[in-house]
Image (cartoon, rainbow, N blue to C red):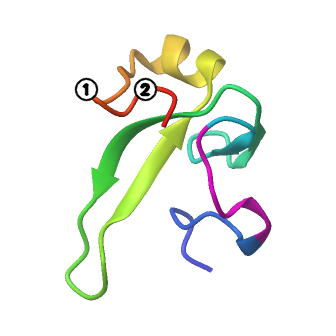
């Protein structure tokens, strides 16, 4: 499985969703980036509050809490 794709059980991401950085469930995940791929649609990447703080990630404009 591609490490950047959230498992089917986490479809919906965002709040109470999936953190792509620690690869686990999260109650504070926010949209931070898009992973462009050569084949297939882009993947929205979400990060939880601790991962955003540790890595200096900033929520994408207009998508906070989406």
- The part of the image, by quadrant, that contains residue 62 is top left
* Quadrant including the N terminus: bottom right
Counting from the top left corner in percent of width and height, residue 23 is at 68, 49
In percent of width and height, residue 44 lies at: 40, 55
**Image x and y of residue 50, in percent:** 64, 17
Residue picked out by circle 2? 64
**Rendered position, 43 above or below 57:** below
Residue at which label 1 appears? 61
Task: Say above or below: 49 vs 35.
Answer: above
Q: Residues within 10 Å of mark 1 (few under 14, many from 20)?
A: few
Residue at x 19% of width, y 82% of height? 38
The image shows residue 41 at horizontal and vertical percentages of 30, 78
Q: Main secondary structure of the magenta part?
A: loop
Residue interval drawn in magenta: 9-14
- Mark 1 and mark 2 in contact (Cβ < 8 Å)? yes
Relative to 23, is 51 on the left or the right? left
Relative side of 47 to 42, left or right = right
Q: Which mark is residue 48?
A: none
Which residue lies most toward the bottom here? 39
Q: Determine whether the residue tagged by mark 1 lies in a helix, strand or loop.
A: loop
Is residue 57 left or right of 39 when viewed as pictured?
Answer: right
Who's the residue at 38% across and 25% down the image?
59
Task: Assess whether residue 63 is covered by the magenta stretch.
Answer: no
């Amino acid at each position: 499985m591609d490490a950047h794709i959230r498992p089917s059980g986490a479809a919906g991401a965002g709040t109470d969703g999936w953190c792509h950085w620690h690869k686990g469930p999260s109650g504070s995940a926010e949209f931070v980036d898009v992973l462009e791929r050569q084949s297939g649609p882009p993947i929205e990447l979400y990060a939880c509050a601790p991962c955003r703080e540790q890595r200096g990630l900033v929520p994408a404009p207009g998508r906070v809490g989406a």
